[in-house]
Image: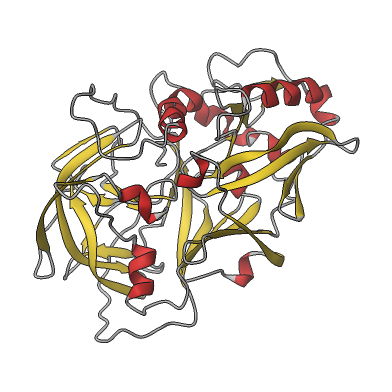
C-alpha cells in the first residue's frame, strides 16, 4: 500500500535496448532519503487511512460513490537522486522524467498526479480506464501501454495509467510505480474488471530482461536528510547489501495479509523472552514509516519497555525516558526458522531528525505504533521503513515468497 510517508523519486533518462537480453546481474537503482512533514498531521495521522485500507484489502477499484480522499503531505520520503550519475527511470520514447512513489503494497503504475503524461511514439491507449483508492489518495484515468526505463532496463508495453484525476499525493509527486502482487490490480480496470496488469518486475521477467521475477530492497538508517542510503534491485538480490544468508518464507495464507507482501511472525522482547506478539500474520511494507503492532501487542511492548501511556500530541509517537532507554533491550522477530534482532537503537526515531517531525530535540520517540485493532484481524503487524532500514528484503513474486537477511546496519547505533 502506498503511504504518503515513504516514496522513491524516479527521474528519466533514455536507454535504448534493441533486443531482449536476459541479464544475469540484477539492475539496481540508488535511493536517497528526504523528510518533509508539513501541516498539523502527525506520521500516524497521515497513515491511519491507509492502515484501514490495507486491513480491508481495499486497494481495488475506487468506488465512485465514496467521498473524495483528503489530500495529505508526505512526511518521510525515499527518492532516487536526480543526478545523471545514478540509475534512472523514464516513460515513453524519448522518455519523460517522472517522480514516482515505489510501493510494494500496491501494483498499479500511473503518472499525471502533477506532471502530465507525455505521449510519445511508444504510447498506446487502450479501451480501459483505471481507478484506485489508496486510503490517503486516489486516481483515475485511461490505461496505456508504454515503454518504461529502469536504469539499464527498457521494458516495452508496460501498462500505465494517465491520471486525469489524482488527489492526496503531495507536491512534487507524479504518480506511483506499484511493485506489489499483480492480483492487487484486479478490479481496478473498467470495463474489464477481472483483468490484471503485470507490474514492471513481472513484465521485465516475461520479456526475458531479468532472470528472476523478484525485487530486492535495501535501506540503511540515517541521521540526516538527503542521504543516499538505499537501493532497489530488479531481478533478484544484491549480495553486497546483506550479510550471511537470505532466508525465505512463503507468503502467508491469512487474509488480508496474503493480498500483500504478507508473512507470519512472532515477536519477543529482551533476554527473558517476554512474548509481545504470538505467531500471527501481517505484512512487510515499503509504504509504511513505522513498526505497527496490534493494540494488545503494543500494550505489552510499552509495559515491557516502560514507555509512555499516551502518544505525544505533536508527533503522534510514544516516548521513553532517557533512564528507561538506557535499559531498553532488543525485540526479536521470529520469521520462519530465523530470529532477527531489532536493537534498542532501531526502536527509536533518529534524535537528530526530531525537529523534522515536529518533535522536541531532547525527547526520545519510539517507532512502534498502534495498528488500531487487537490481534486476530488478519493483519496484526506492519514491518515498515524503520524495520527495513535494518534488514534486507527480497520480494520474489515468481515463487510467491519473501526473503530476509541481516545487513551491515542491523546493529547500527547511529540513532
The residue nearer to you, when weighing 45 against 96, is: 45
Q: Residue at x 29, y 32 (%)?
A: 168
List x then y, in percent, for residue 96. 20, 61
Q: Nearer the viewer, residue 16 or 351?
A: 16
The image position of residue 84, as x and y in percent, is: 35, 67
Say if 88 sits above or below 80 in the image: below
Where residue 118 sits, quadrant-wise, is bottom left
- Check the image and report above or below for 134 versus 409: above
**Residue 332 image offset from top left, x and y in percent:** 77, 43
Quadrant (top left/top right/bottom left/bottom right) for the C terminus: top right
Q: Quadrant of the N terminus?
A: top left
Residue 394 seen in the current view: no
Left or right of 234 in this view: 317: right
Say if residue 381 shows up in the picture: yes
Q: What color scheme is it?
A: secondary structure
Farthest-out residue, right: 272
Is residue 205 shown left or right of residue 251?
Answer: left
Apparent side of residue 384 relative to residue 71 in the rendered image (left or right):
right
Residue 406, quarter of the rendered image = bottom right
Q: In the image, what residue occupies the spot 60% across and 52% down?
A: 220
Query: Residue sitting at 64 percent across and 13 percent down?
Result: 310
Amino acid at each position: 500500500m502506498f503511504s504518503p510517508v515513504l516514496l522513491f523519486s524516479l527521474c528519466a533518462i533514455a536507454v535504448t535496448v534493441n533486443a531482449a537480453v536476459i541479464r544475469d546481474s540484477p539492475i539496481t537503482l540508488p535511493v536517497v532519503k528526504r523528510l518533509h512533514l508539513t501541516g498539523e498531521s502527525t506520521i500516524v495521522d497521515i497513515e491511519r487511512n491507509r492502515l484501514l485500507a490495507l486491513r480491508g484489502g481495499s486497494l481495488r477499484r475506487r468506488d465512485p460513490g465514496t467521498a473524495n480522499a483528503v489530500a495529505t503531505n508526505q512526511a518521510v520520503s525515499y527518492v532516487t537522486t536526480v543526478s545523471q550519475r545514478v540509475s534512472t527511470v523514464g516513460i515513453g520514447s524519448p522518455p519523460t522524467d517522472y517522480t514516482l512513489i515505489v510501493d510494494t503494497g500496491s501494483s498499479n503504475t500511473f503518472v499525471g498526479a502533477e506532471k502530465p503524461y507525455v505521449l510519445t511514439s511508444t504510447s498506446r491507449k487502450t479501451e480501459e480506464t483505471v481507478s484506485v483508492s489508496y486510503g490517503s489518495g486516489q486516481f483515475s484515468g485511461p490505461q496505456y501501454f508504454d515503454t518504461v526505463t529502469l536504469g539499464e532496463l527498457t521494458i516495452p508495453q508496460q501498462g500505465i495509467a494517465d491520471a486525469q484525476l489524482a488527489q492526496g499525493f503531495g507536491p512534487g509527486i507524479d504518480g506511483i510505480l506499484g511493485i506489489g502482487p499483480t492480483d492487487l490490480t484486479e478490479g481496478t480496470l473498467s470495463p474489464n474488471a477481472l483483468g490484471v496488469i503485470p507490474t514492471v518486475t513481472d513484465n521485465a521477467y516475461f520479456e526475458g530482461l531479468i532472470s528472476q521475477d523478484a525485487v530486492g530492497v535495501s535501506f540503511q538508517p540515517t541521521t540526516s536528510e538527503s542521504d543516499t542510503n538505499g537501493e532497489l534491485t530488479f531481478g533478484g538480490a544484491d549480495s553486497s547489501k546483506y550479510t550471511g544468508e537470505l532466508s525465505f518464507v512463503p507468503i502467508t495464507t491469512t487474509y488480508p495479509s496474503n493480498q500483500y507482501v504478507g508473512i507470519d511472525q512472532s515477536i519477543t522482547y529482551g533476554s527473558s523472552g517476554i512474548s509481545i506478539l504470538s505467531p500471527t500474520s501481517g505484512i512487510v511494507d515499503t509504504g509504511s514509516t513505522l513498526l505497527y503492532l496490534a493494540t494488545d501487542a503494543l500494550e505489552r511492548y510499552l509495559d515491557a519497555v516502560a514507555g509512555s501511556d499516551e502518544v505525544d500530541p505533536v508527533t503522534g509517537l510514544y516516548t521513553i525516558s532517557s533512564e528507561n532507554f538506557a535499559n531498553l533491550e532488543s525485540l526479536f522477530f521470529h520469521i520462519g526458522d530465523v530470529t532477527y534482532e531489532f536493537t534498542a537503537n532501531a526502536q527509536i526515531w533518529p534524535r537528530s531528525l526530531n525537529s523534522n517531525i515536529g518533535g522536541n530535540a531532547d525527547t526520545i520517540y519510539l517507532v512502534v505504533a498502534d495498528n488500531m485493532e487487537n490481534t486476530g484481524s488478519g493483519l496484526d503487524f506492519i514491518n515498515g521503513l524503520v524495520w527495513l532500514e535494518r534488514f534486507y528484503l527480497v520480494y520474489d513474486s515468481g515463487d510467491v515468497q519473501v526473503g530476509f537477511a541481516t545487513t551491515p546496519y542491523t546493529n547500527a547505533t547511529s540513532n
